[in-house]
Image: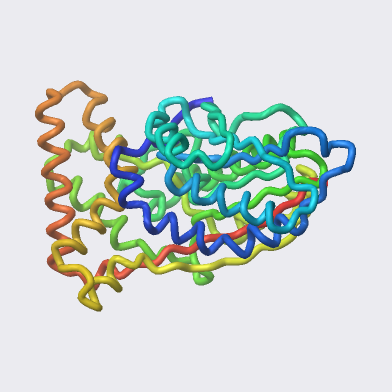
Amino acid sequence: MSEAIVNVTGTYNTYSQPQLAAINLSISFIHQAIDALNIDNSLLNNPLIIADFGTSHGANSIYAIKLIINYLREKKKDYREPLVIHNDLPTNDWEKVFKLLINDNSYKAVASGHSFYEQCIPNNSLSIGYSSTSIHWLSKKPCNISNHCVSLFAIDDELIAFKSQARTDYMNFLENRSHELISGGILILAIPSLNDQGKCGNQNAKNLLYTCAEQIGLTSEELLNYTIPSHIRSYDECVDEKLFNQYSFQLIKAELHSSTINFYEELQVGQTTLEEFARNRTEFMRPWCEPILKTALEINKQHSKEEIDQLLNQYWIIYKSKIEEKPDEYKSYLSYTYLILKKN
């Protein structure tokens, strides 16, 4: 399978507060899922395996895993020390993850370097699966978008292609998690979604990505190649009971929630300056967006490494300045579909 899922740059842990907010919104779902966890007594001598799919640089992943372990310890009389599997692509910056795990040292963990659209763990071995703000990244780019870099703005056949790829990937994700989970095991998902009116609360910030690409003088071919392989699903695309039944899942709970990106609120109450707000807002986008733009600049081998670095720097200077000019346009929120699924 093509590994088009994006690897983020080095500042991800520092500027991923919105992703952390999504995890905090999932706490009640973690508790309810663990309450529904039902492990056959014959399996109690086996390791209790927990996996996070989409670990990235590790800070948020470790935080989520500790939430799960702490509630297990509190609620389960048959609690036993778990083995945690942190999953991400082999090209992920695993050194950052390992350093955080060593410093934390509160649980035993290993790493899995497979795409989470493939099977990562042996059949019938996983007790608890978790994934937050990860599966909107697609396994591959289904096509280039001719009028933008984000599928939110795609139209006609290009939008259909992204929706179709997102559905195929979702099916593969659920099928492989179903193979891995034991009967009675649980899967907890926080999926970036459109709101209940079909809107994206981060639309202006995403639209600005393409505006800046045009302003640094990308060629028409480079603009076409600058297509981000992600898709924000609707609630109905996430909550597909026919698909759940197909892969032996019982839907325990599904809810749509929104969380504000608190950078703007901090500006409003004077906790940050306008320059700090614009920088934070920019650095939230940069870790996952820059590798894609860099690849688009490298494909045709028309630029030296120095020229690419200069173009990337220029791009983010423009992005930050645009936010500083009109900060009120970047008061954003993110919506998530939260799911608890139980393996039959």
Which residue lies at the image location 19% right of the left edge and 56% below the top edge?
Answer: 279
Residue 9's x, y, as percent? 31, 38
> 296 above or below 283?
above
Q: Nearer the viewer, residue 308 or 57?
A: 57
Scheme of image coloration: rainbow
The quadrant holding residue 340 is bottom right
Residue 263's x, y, as percent? 29, 66
Residue 154's x, y, as percent? 39, 51
Instruction: Using the rendered image of the protein, determine whether residue 221 is visible from the camera's viewpoint.
Output: no
- 236 left or right of 11 in image: right
Residue 24's x, y, as percent? 51, 61
Q: Quadrant of the N terminus?
A: top right
> 74 above or below 3?
below
Instruction: Using the rendered image of the protein, determine whether residue 152 is visible from the camera's viewpoint.
Output: yes
> 192 above or below 247?
below
Which residue lies at the image location 42% right of the left edge and 38% below the top edge?
Answer: 103
How many numbered marks are there? 0
- 331 left or right of 259 in image: left
Which residue lies at the image location 31% right of the left edge and 49% below the top edge?
Answer: 14
Which residue lies at the image location 27% right of the left edge and 40% below the top edge?
Answer: 290
The quadrant holding residue 120 is top right
Question: Which residue appears farthest toward the bottom when viewing the image?
Answer: 269
> 292 above or below 232?
above
